[in-house]
Image: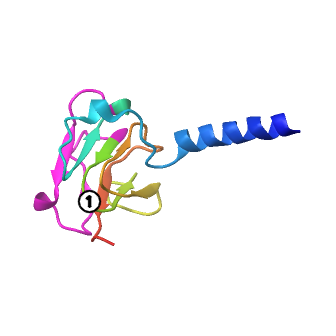
Amino acid sequence: MRRRFVCALALTTSLLAVAAPGASADPTGAATCEPGQVCFWTGPAFAGAPAAAFELAEVNVEQCISLPDGVDALSFANRMDRYVTMYQSRECATEGDFSTYPGDGVFVPDVPFTVRAFQIWEKP
């Protein structure tokens, strides 16, 4: 019984580390994303240079920002000190998938849906 419990606990812990939104992998591939930016890659695991990067000076808080044409993100880094919501819809519609991620260094190498837009929120 004890062995079964330990195995179940280990499996649950492993699944939480992989499946949790905002779970960080080794962010070394995301090193090109500067502090204060939100960066997007079209492939998983931060492959290559970011396809798009945004700073707070370029966008308005609480405004829906669509990624540029041809950019559908499969990985991203939030290096802002604010919460950011990622949307499957280019219009930030809540009918599709969406998730909010905290700031200050969240690296998501494999987003659970294709990101096409985002919103930055005021500091909590």
Left or right: 37 as drawn, with respect to 5: left
Q: Which of 70/9 is in front?
A: 9
Answer whether residue 18 is visible to the viewer in this image.
Answer: yes
Task: Return the residue found at the far front.
Answer: 2
Task: Return the residue found at the far left.
Answer: 57
Q: Which range is magenta?
A: 46-75
Q: Residue at x 67, y 42 (%)?
A: 12
Count of numbered badges drawn on the protein = 1
Task: From this view, report whether residue 59 is shown above or below residue 29.
Answer: below
- Picture colour scheme: rainbow
Q: Secondary structure at mark 1?
A: loop
User: Magenta includes 47?
Assistant: yes
Left or right: 11 as drawn, with respect to 59: right
Q: Residues within 10 Å of mark 1 (few under 14, many from 20)?
A: some
Residue 80 x, y percent position in the rendering:
24, 55
Q: Which residue is mark 1?
A: 81
Amino acid carrying label 1: it is: Asp
